[in-house]
Image: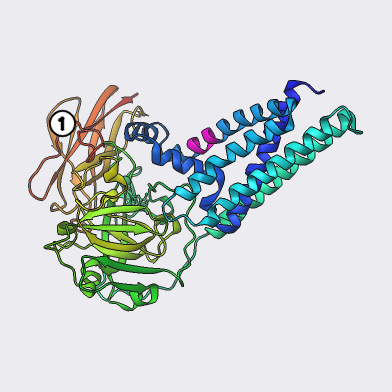
Amino acid sequence: MRSRLSYAAFGVLASLAGVAAGHLAAAALEPSSSPVLVVGSSVIDLTPTPAKEWAIRQFGTHDKTVLVGSVLLGVLALAALAGLLARRRLRYGAALLVALVAVPAVAALRRPGATPLDVLPSLVAALAGVAALAWLARAGSPAAAGGRRGVLIAGGLLAGGAVGLGAVGLWLASYRTRAVAIDLPAAADPAPAFPTGLDQRVPGITPFRTPRADFYRVDTRLALPVVDPEGWTLTIDGDVAREVSFTLDELLAMPLVERDITLTCVSNEVGGRYVGGARWLGVPLTDLLDRAGIDDTRADQILSTDVDGMTISTPLDLAIDGRDAMIAVGMNGASLPREHGFPARMVVPGLYGFVSACKWITRMTLTTYAAQDAYWTQRKWATDAPIKISSRIDTPKPLATIDAGRTVIGGIAWAQHSGGVQRVEVRVDGGAWQQARLGPSAGNDYWRQWYLPWTAERGQHTLAVRATDGAGDVQTAVRATPFPEGSSGVQQIVINVS
Ligand SMILES: Nc1nc2c(c(=O)[nH]1)N[C@H]1C(S)=C(S)[C@@H](COP(=O)(O)O)O[C@H]1N2
Ligand SMILES: [Mo]
């Protein structure tokens, strides 16, 4: 009988083969039903809000990589245990592997919008894993002809096979979620010419318009949904005079508006990166709601549902108060990137994304907060969540060392839908607030760039920034955490001048 270590390795190898086979099966059927991703998504959904906040703070946009990595590590530890059990009896090890795979199988079925087919990748993983374990155990048994060499060959073949299957699975999933482009009609109501930003003149300042590929991404998904634009529809139901559905072509045939709007995530810390400015093309929300005939004496929320059943609620009164809320189909001159909601998403100026910006949207249900609650409402986040005034220093960077002499302090500020940013002030070393120069305006729903020329003297300095909106409200210095309705406070950074 082989050593414990060999059997632990058998277990790990067998599980890797199973995971790879399951991932490939999922890539072919439905990428997000991959066993590892399903477990990861369930962990996301079950994680208490403070822990989620912590992970987003610690790992930023790598939070998902860290999560998937942790799930894999956990699986491998249990897999080693399955190998050890198989040393006593193959049956025991196989049973543990099957029990392991039962977790994603059940989780896959419990996900919103699940179909029975979603367990298939887990079944494939179980079969492949158990078969691999049996094969290794046979090659490793004293009765086997190959001896030590046979075990090594079997292990090598399996490892190679697992890597191959995994690679094909990864490639297939990325191929199926590759960028797609559909032709968009011109806007009936176009946005004015976009002004040249300060980024041309002030090095280090955030671009006035965020390129599609650089736009921040925040959602609960580990794998992008594969949405066929031909089969996609948007339905409006609930408290409406008549339920209506639109195909993508029907949406595109309606008069489209084009607007410059800055999106912000409620998870953005003061000074954070979860904010981006883009030019959106879409159908005004009220044009769509008018087709359905809404009853706003009954409903108080729009409950949006995405292609997988993820829900986002939006206060109805704010969505229809005259602001440029829309179902967007275009971003910066092309159809939406998959990451940002292809083929259509909601955009509501002035509300944080988690209460407005439903990506991959397929349904808007007019209902009440009393009757139904959305994903983040169930997790105790605020329902009415206007974006708070905020500002950020882009240059110099925190803790940077810069040369003494003439330089600039620069960044961005936003106060969507509250008259835009009317003033930005900078404070050096706790002195008086000095008025910064503002970049051009692209409307009140859009952020504004700013800069302050500064003669930097040797030593350590503290820089702070604050913005004032169109109503004269000054960004508060009172600190608030992102939970439950967005961060506040003044960004303060320390730099060195040498
Ligand atoms: N379907 C879906 N839509 C979603 C989310 C999500 O998890 N699922 N996240 C929301 C959040 S929290 C934000 S801040 C915005 C971010 O949009 P972006 O990723 O295009 O920047 O999308 C919103 N729309
Ligand atoms: Mo968000």
Residue 57 visible here = yes
- Closer-to-camera residue (119/153): 119
The kind of residue on which mark 1 rests is Val
User: Is 77 on the left or on the right of 185, as rendered?
Assistant: right
User: Is 360 on the left or on the right of 155, as rendered?
Assistant: left
Residue positioned 51% across, 45% down in the render: 106
Q: Position of residue 26 (x, y in %)?
A: 58, 53
- Residue 68 is inside the magenta segment: yes
Residue positioned 27% across, 72% down in the render: 243
- Closer-to-camera residue (428/284): 284
Q: Main secondary structure of the magenta part?
A: helix
Label 1 CA crowd tier, 10 Å (few <14, some 14–19, many 20+) = few
Which residues, given as a range, are shown in magenta?
A: 66-71
Indicate the colouring scheme.
Answer: rainbow
Q: Quadrant of residue 79?
A: top right
Q: Which quarter shows the N terminus?
A: top right
Q: Position of residue 231 (x, y in %)?
A: 45, 71
